[in-house]
Image (spheres, grey):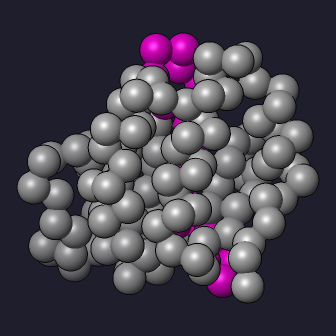
Amino acid sequence: MPRSPTDDVDAFLAALPPAQQARVRRLRAVILAADPRIGEAIKWNAPSFHVEGRHFATMQLRRADRMLLVLHLGAGKRALPDGAIADPQRQLAWLGADRATWSFVDREDVEARAAGLQDLLRQWMAHI
C-alpha cells in the first residue's frame, strides 16, 4: 500500500525558507524511497524517520550552510557491531558506537549521493 506524506511533516516543510525547503524535500524523498516500510514524523523539531515506530534517522536543520542526517538506533543506547555498516566512501562522521551523521550542502549534493545514502540506510535499518 502506498505511503502518504504526513500532515505534520508537510506543514513543517512548508514553513521553511525556499532554498532550505528544496534540499529537505529532496532528502526526504530519497529516504522514503529507500524502503516502503519507512514512516515519518516531526521529532526533535525536524523530520524524523522510523520503521515500525522505531526512529533511526533525524534531520538536523540548524545550520545554514549544510544539513545533517543523524543516524541512530533509537532511544536506548546500543552499539553497532564492528563492521556492521559498509561506508567505503567515508561519508559518515561517527559520533559514537550507536550514531553517525551524513552531511549535505544542497539539493544537488543530496541528488549526487542519493543511491549511496539509500544503500547505507538499508544497512542501518537492519540494526534497529
Locate residue 127: give its quadrant: bottom left
Locate residue 12, reporting x and y percent.
82, 38
Q: Residue at x 79, y 48 (%)?
A: 9
Q: Residue 80: in sight, yes or no?
A: yes
Task: Please state if 53 lies on the left or on the right of 105 as rendered.
Answer: right
Q: In which quarter of the image is the N terminus?
A: bottom right
Closer to the camera, 102 or 27?
A: 27
Is residue 127 located in the magenta-colored stretch of the structure?
no
Q: Residue 96: in sight, yes or no?
A: no
50 is higher (above) or lower (below) than 81? above
Q: Which residue is drawn at 46% across and 79% down?
A: 128
Closer to the camera, 119 or 78?
A: 119
Locate residue 10: give its quadrant: top right
Locate residue 114, reporting x and y percent.
37, 49
**Where are the magenta residues, as a range?**
50-67
Q: Which residue is drawn at 80% across and 66% down?
A: 4
57 is higher (above) or lower (below) than 73? above
